[in-house]
Image (tube, rainbow, N blue to C red):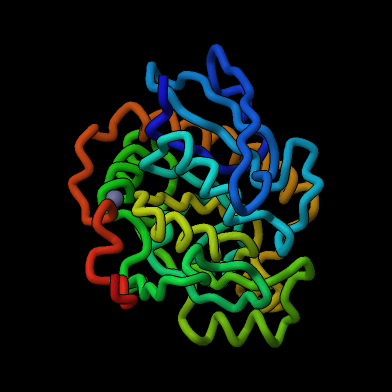
Amino acid sequence: MQPSIGIIGGSGLYSMLENATEVEVETRYGKPSDKISIGTLAGVTVAFLPRHAKKHTIPPHKVPFRANIEAMHKLGVKRIIATNAVGSLKPDYKPGEVAFFDQFVNMTYGREETFFDESEVVHVSSAEPYCPQMRAVAYKCANEAGIPAHESGTVVVINGPRFSTKAESRTFSSQGHHMINMTQYPEIMLAKERQMCYLGIALITDYDAGLEGRSDIKPVTNAEVIKIFGENVGKAKRIITDVVKGLPSHRACKCANSLDGALMTQK
Ligand SMILES: [Zn+2]
């Protein structure tokens, strides 16, 4: 059966799928990060792709974002559920908690960030990049599961692979942004260009460099980070399963019409 939901995330999520088979997908943008597993989750056919490849060999700035989204699109995926480890830029976004992105600030460079760089000029709106329907369902699922969650939050996407300096981190924090990550962009916008719904689940792992030195913030030790990371996989699995189960099959959002009025080139 064709998967209508695609999951992009850490390799710890593999074990979620039942009766999984792997498929190799070729796209005009090259190969995706790895083979895609197709199986069932809560009785629904889903596709799973590890963003950094199974053995975590692809650094953030080298993820083949276009091939990944195009491969999901070719398989018939209409909705993406993505998990991302993030650093917190705000004291009240605590390690171990979960947040659902509603905005991003792109600080990456040199990435292939659009499907429309050939003969068509397309300006896609990115005012509301994340699917509001999926975000509402996910927040409800997290609450019902007793997982501490934030209904929204802005993620600053840096190029990596290095982490921020304290000065950079303080700058982002003072600008009012909540989280920091290296892979949300351009993944989210490429999904939008393919008129998919996209849910970004942020798994808060630690406080970013700028908060670490503050006397009111308890520093997170390496052991705590490892413990939180492990617990986050469990939380991600629970939320993803509940979202897949609880999501109405009808897309009551405008994501499927993201390209309406966006094409500037005359046909
Ligand atoms: Zn949507």
Q: Quadrant of residue 182?
A: bottom right
Whether residue 228 is visible, yes or no, is no
Report the quarter where the N terminus lies: top left
- Which of the pair 187/157 is nearer the observer? 187
On screen, 105 above or below 225?
Answer: below
Quadrant in the picture for residue 110: bottom right
Q: Is residue 221 visible?
A: yes
Q: Position of residue 28 (x, y in %)?
A: 60, 50
Q: Residue at x 55, y 72 (%)?
A: 156
**Residue shown at 51%/20% (left/top)?**
39
Relative to the observer, which residue lies in front, 117 or 164?
117
- Left or right: 142 as drawn, with respect to 35: left
The residue at the point 55 percent across, 23 percent down is 16
Quarter of the image where one finds residue 191: bottom left
Residue 62 screen position, x and y as percent: 73, 60
Name the residue located 55 percent from the left edge and 12 percent from the top edge.
19
Image spot of residue 33 (x, y percent): 69, 44
